[in-house]
Amino acid sequence: MLYARVGRTGYMRNVAYVWSHMLNNLASAIFGFIYIALWQAVAPASSTTDPYTQSTMTAMMVLAQVFAWVTTFLPAGLGIQAGVRSGAIALEMARPVPFFPMVLARESGSLVYQFLYRSIPLALLFACTVGFPRPASAVSLLLTVPSLLLGAYMALTMVYTVGMTALWTTEIRWAHWLYTSLVALLSGGWIPADIMPGWLGKVAPYLPFASQQFYPIRIYLGLDGAWALVIQAAWALVMTVWCYWITRRAFRRVVVQGG
Amino acid sequence: MKLYLRLLAAGLRAKLQYKFDFLMTSVLYGLITGLEFLTVAAILYRFSTVAGWNVYEIALLSGMASASNGLYRVLGSELTLFERYLVTGEFDNLLIRPWPTLASLLTRNFDIGRVGAYLQGSLLIMVGLHGVGAAPWLWVYCLMVPFAGALVVGSIYLAVATAGFWITRIDDLQTFAANAPLTAVNYPQEIFPKALRWLFLSLLPMAAIGYVPLTYALGKGGSVVGLVVPFLAAGVSVAVTLRLWGWGERHYQSTGS
C-alpha cells in the first residue's frame, strides 16, 4: 500500500508537464523516422537468411521508440544525486522503509506515466504514419508483457546504480553519459545486438543491456521465445542482489553535503 | 566583443586551475562521443555503404557534426541549460548587469572539457580524409568547417532559448530542434524523406555543415557553391537568431518566485 502511494507520487510528479512531454513525443518520433530511413537504406528488401530485412527493421525501430519510454528513458540517476547534494539522502535513508524498494516504487509510478503519455501516443503516431507492427502471435504478445516488465526493472536497477555512484563521487554526469552511450550501442533497440561486429555480436545479446530493448522487441516480433525471458530474469536477479549490496555499502558512506 | 573575450579568458584560467579534472573530462568526452560513432560504424561494418557513402565518407559527416557540436559546447554550454534560468527567474539577475545578457550567459560556464568531443570529431575527420585520399585543400577546408558548424549549432540552441521567453519549458524543444538533427547529419541526407531533408537544410540547417559541402567535395553531385554553404548558413543563422533573441528578451516576463 505504501509503495503504491509512493508510486502515485512519481506518477503525479510527471502529470504537471504533460504538454511539454507531448512535444517531446514528436522529437522521439523524429528519431524513429531517422532510424527507419537509415535501415530502409541499408537493410535488404527481402532475404531468406537475414532476419533483419527492411520491413523487420522498420518494425524494430518503431518498437524501439515506443518501448524505450518504459525500458530505457529514465531520469539521470533517478534523482538520487540531488538528494546527495542537498543532504536529503540522509533523511530518506533514515526512513523505516528500505531505500531501494522505495526508489523503485517512486520511479515505477513515473514509468506508468511514461507508458500512458509517451509510449501510447507515440504508438498512435507511428500507426498513422509508417504503421505499428502486429505481434507475431498471441503467445508473442503475452510473452512481451513480462519481457517489458523485466526490461523496465533492468533499466531501473542500472540507473539506480548510476545514481548511487553519487555517494562516492557526488557528480554522476560521467556515469550517466557512459550508461546512456552503452545503452544506445548495446541495448539492441537501434541496432540489433547480434549484428555487432565480431566477438561483440556474440557477447552483446548476453549483456544486461540487451534485456532493455533487444529481447522485448524480438519476442514481440516472434524472433525469440520464452527462453529469452530466462536471460532477462537471470540478469534481473543479479541486479537485485547488486543493488541491495551497493545500497548497504552506500549507507556507510553517507556524507551530508547540504545543511 | 572585447569584454566577451576578457570574460572568456577569465573562465579559461579558472578551469585550468584544475588540470587533472580538465584532462580527465576531455578524455572522457572524447571517448563517449567516440562510442556514438561506434553505432554508425557497426552498421557500416555489416552493410559497407549507406546510400553509396562508405565508412570514411560517413566518418567525415559524423566528425564534422561531432566537432561542431563539441566546439559549440565549449563556448555555449550554459545556453543549453537556459530553461533553468527561466524557471527559477535567474535570468532577472542577468538583465540588471551593465552588459548584454547573452555575453553574461555564455561566459558563465566555459566548458573547456568539451574540447575532448571537438578533438574526437577532428580525429574522425582526419581518419575520413586519409581514407578518401583527400587533396591538401580539402584537409584545410574540412578542419575549418567545424568553426562555422559551431555557429550553426549555437544558433539553433539560441533560437530554442529564445522560444523559452514565451513557453518557459524548452528542454523538450531542444531535443527536437538540436539533438534530432545532430543525429540525422551523421548520415547522407538522401536516405531521409523529403520533409526531413528540407527541415535539416532550412529551418534547422545542420545538414549545411557537412553534407552539402561534402557532396561536392567527394564528387557525389552538387556544385562548388556547396563549399560556401556552411559559412553562409553560419552567418545567416547567427544574424537571424541574434535578432530573435533581442526581440524575445524585450518580451520576457519574469517567471521565478
Image (cartoon, rainbow, N blue to C red):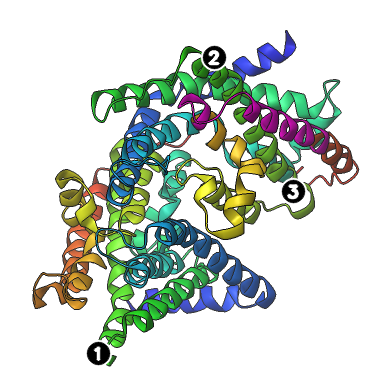
Question: Residue shown at 39%/64% (left/top)?
Answer: B69
Residues behind callouts 3 and 2 on a single chain? yes
**Residue at the top extreme of this rendering:** A1
Foreground mark, 3 or 2, reads 2
| Amino acid type, mark 3 | Thr
Looking at the picture, tell me which residue is in the foreground, A105 or A252: A105
Q: CA distance from mark 3 to mark 2?
A: 36 Å
A100 to B97, vertically: above or below: above
What separation in Å lies between label 1 and label 3 (alpha carbons)? 47 Å
The relative height of residue B66 versus residue A109 in the rendered view (above or below) is below
| Residue under the point 69% across and 26% down | A104
Does A226 appear in magenta?
A: yes
Residue density around tag 1, few if under 14, some if 14–19, many if 20 or more, within 10 Å: few
Under circle 2, the secondary element is: helix
Question: What residue did someone put label 3 on?
Answer: A165
Task: First in sequence, mark 3 or 2: give its number.
Answer: 2
The residue segment tinted magenta is A218-242
Residue for badge 1: B137
Magenta stretch, main secondary structure, is: helix
Q: Residue at x 25, y 58 (%)?
A: B51
In the image, B247: left or right of B44? left
Amino acid type of disc 2? Leu
Mark 3 and 2 residues: CB-CB less than 8 Å, in contact?
Answer: no
Find residue A142 and name its label. 2
Q: Chain of mark 2?
A: A
